[in-house]
Image (spheres, grey):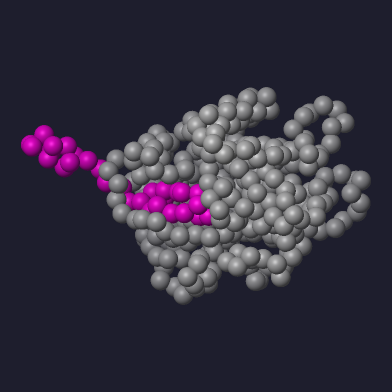
Amino acid sequence: MFWYQHKMNAAKWIKFFKVSPGGNITILLDQTQVEAADRAPLAARLMDKMSLGAEQVGFIDWPGKKRKSNADALPSIKMMGGEFCANAVRAYAGVLASQMGDSLPWRGKIESSGLSAPVNAYVMGSERLDASIEIPLGNDFRISPLRSSEGDQLSLDKGALVSLPGISHILLPGIPDSEGAGLELDNDLMLSAANRRRELGLEDQPAVGCIWFDLKKDMVSMLPLVWVRDTNTCCLETSCGSGALALALFLGRMGGKPGTGMPRDARPSGVFSPPFASYTNFYWIMQPSGEALWVSYTLQKNGSETEGANLFQPSNIWLGGAFNIIARGEALI
């Protein structure tokens, strides 16, 4: 009994939120309680189903905490591998909106690992909240064919490699049939993703996703698998924000084939777009969780398509979807 009490007294507790941005279960931890070098191993441990259980971990400024060193500092989130995670940033926006006590809609700015500029965040809704972020990509992304042979061109049938700040995504047409496959399929997908990363020379990237996608008459669906280098974790995610962004950019680059973009008056109930931002392209992308993420952006039409990919310059890029808080409290570490 004395030994047990001593161990409990010596234990360290850390504040956490467990949140679901579109089904992508995320743990948000107080970054002031964990040294930078300890974040990746701690994240890997807490993600385990025998612990808090999640698909990813982000380290945040605790909501409402006064910053004595810099009162003007923006809220920030640092992911477990230093990557950019759109869903985690959305999750933090939702947490901030819920903790600040302000009435909705809530607006703010958030700094994120993997990005050089802060994102604009917007939380709206009543019974069903939608947390969205404007992603400052500029020209800091690249869409490339999966094969580097001379003369190979982008094609919806062949997929693409989309390189974003802090994460790259390998887009692959066709979602594998998972009915009755279980663990065997999961292992096959992880092996396939590992082979793709190696073939494309992406193993030095902070994070790499494999996104299998299907195009249907009235929507797009995707299956995301994300590998994070520093934690050496590979997870079949129930939702992936940056993967949805990569897919929406690729579809727009290919001309927004019929059925991949939804008109403004055809959005499903509960799916929003920011009313203060105009857009030319809107994509509703179904996630494995059964929730939808939406991506909207404005595409400038300059010159002709034959002049190359540099003419694809999206701006006002927004990504959003449902958000809810599952739990909050303290975890033993």
Occupied quadrant, residue 292: bottom right
Q: Is residue 142 above or below residue 205?
A: below
Q: Is residue 14 above or below residue 108?
A: above
Q: Is residue 236 among the parts visible in the rendering?
A: yes
Q: Which residues are magenta?
A: 1-29
In the rendered structure, the answer to whether residue 181 lies left or right of residue 248 reads: left
Name the residue at the left extreme: 2
Task: Provide residue 77's location: percent of width, then percent of height.
Answer: 48, 50
Q: Does the stretch in magenta take in 65?
A: no
Name the residue at the bottom extreme: 103
Name the residue at the front extreme: 180
Q: Is residue 330 above or below residue 10?
A: below
Residue at 81% from the left image edge and 47% from the top image edge: 254
Quadrant where the C terminus is found in the figure: top left
Residue nearest the observer in this picture, 46 or 223: 223
Q: Does the stretch in magenta take in 21?
A: yes
Residue nearest the observer in this picture, 237 or 167: 237
Residue nearest the observer in this picture, 121 or 264: 264
Residue at 57% from the left image edge and 39% from the top image edge: 179
Quadrant where the N terminus is found in the figure: top left
Task: Provide residue 199's location: percent of width, then percent of height.
Answer: 68, 24
